[in-house]
Amino acid sequence: MIGRIGFLSEVLAILLCIHNLYGKKFRLDIKNIIAIGADIIFLQLIDEGKIASEMSMFAYLIVICYCIVEFGVNKRELIVNNILCITMMSILQAASWTLLDAFHLIHESDSGSGIINLMVNSLVLLIVLFVVPHIGLHKFSVFMQQKVVLLRIILVIAMLFIGYLLIIMKVTRYLAPEQYVVIIISLCLLGGVTYMWQKNQYKVREQKVELQMHQIYGEGFQNLVTEIRKRQHDFQNHLNTIYSLHYTCSTFEELVEQQEAYADAIQEDNKYNKLLSVGNPIIIGFLYGKFLQADKRGITVVYNIKVADLESKMPIHKLVEIIGNLFDNAMDAVEENNVEKAIYLDFVETPEKIEFKIKNESGHIPQEKLIKMFERGESSKGEQRGLGLANVKQICGEYKCDLQVHNQKNDAGRFYTDFAICMKI
């Protein structure tokens, strides 16, 4: 009876694991009862010696048949999920055995191996019930169905190692030192697959953010293009006005003054046209939005942008985050201090590197305070502020960018704070 309860725990754990891999909830119905009963009978026959113990892995054939009946015939899904199930159950059984053995709960006794089997599989069942549902097995299964063959080969190798371990453990009821080596190798292989999975998930998130960036700042780019097209329709009118100014001016000096004033007005209206020389629409849309914000706050932006495709290791949304934090910081600085309401921005791309600089008048700031500005939460604007520069520092460190800040006096005796970032291509 004890042995049968142990087999029941093992079969329930397997079915629960399979349902987690398929992303389905487990419900006790006639199909589940038949599968559980068939598996218990098969394992019982092995335990009684009527079937060779080396055949124990064939119990999973019952599980495969169950998957076909319960979830349908999707070859890739069927193969991947059953391989993952075998691997995971083997690891959990080996880990449970090792844990119980470490606490001296496993030993030879008159009760035989039935109690040991019950203890191991009960612990596995508890893990599958309360831990496994929270680790995203279904997402991992979907990933393994889509990823390159290499990952599947690694997983199969790990499964073979652990399957071998499972057979040895069931036959001998003992783990020798070399079998612990097998555990370590298998865990390393599975750890490698997991790392590659997480790396792929990170790339997926990056691509999702990039798409959101296109949706958000693509609108700003189109607005800029629309504005420029509207002004191009007035180009001939502006020329005619300039040509006709001499009819309204009585002196040459007045004509020059009127022409300069009119030309300055046209330049002011078209001051952001040069943004279209930037090759990346996300950056164009983002900068255009920031420049309009500065206009509303009465801040002049003097910019020099010479970039093309922005071929950098840093994702574009991270670059946008850096530029946005530095630009917002500069706008706040010129508003809070009695200084020139202007921001100077340089953004230049060469075959070797990308440089971004932003400068504003700030008054004198000691170097120690400049360094402290990059500490998380350090701000003169109250609590929950001061995160922007800390994020800039973190991103630059992550992508190995050179970040510098200086506070220098110009020829007129005014102090300017200059943030500079250099990224190698």
Image: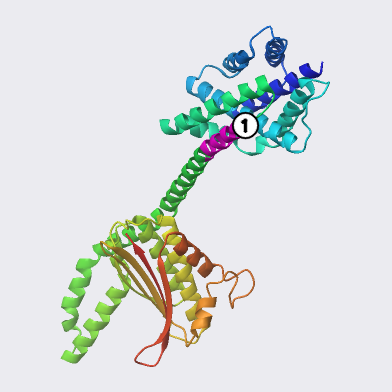
Looking at this view, is 378 or 358 the one in front? 378
Residue displayed at 19% across by 81% down: 245
List x then y, in percent, for residue 336.
Answer: 53, 81
Question: Closest to the observer: 315 or 162?
Answer: 162
What's the residue at 70%, 23% (across, down)?
A: 10
Q: What residue is shown with label 1?
A: 91
* Label 1 element class: helix
Say if 316 sits above or below 56 in the image.
Answer: below
Q: Amino acid at mark 1?
A: Ile
From the viewer's perspective, tell me whether residue 398 is left or right of residue 56.
left
71 shown above or below 376: above
Q: Residue at x 47, y 87 (%)?
A: 363
Measured as percent of width and height from the top left, residue 203 is found at 45, 46
Q: Position of residue 134 (x, y in %)?
A: 65, 38
Farthest residue toward the top? 50
- Where, by quadrant of the figure, is residue 304 drawn? bottom left
Q: Nearer the viewer, residue 296 or 232?
A: 296
Which segment is the magenta one? Answer: 176-191
Q: Residue at x 19, y 77 (%)?
A: 242
The quarter of the rendered structure image containing the N terminus is top right
- Asked if residue 347 lies in the magenta stretch, the reply is no
Residue 180 part of the magenta-drawn span: yes
Label 1: few (<14), some or many (≥20) within 10 Å?
many
Asked if 185 appears above or below 299 in the picture, the reply is above
Q: Could you tell me residue 249's position as x and y percent?
A: 19, 87
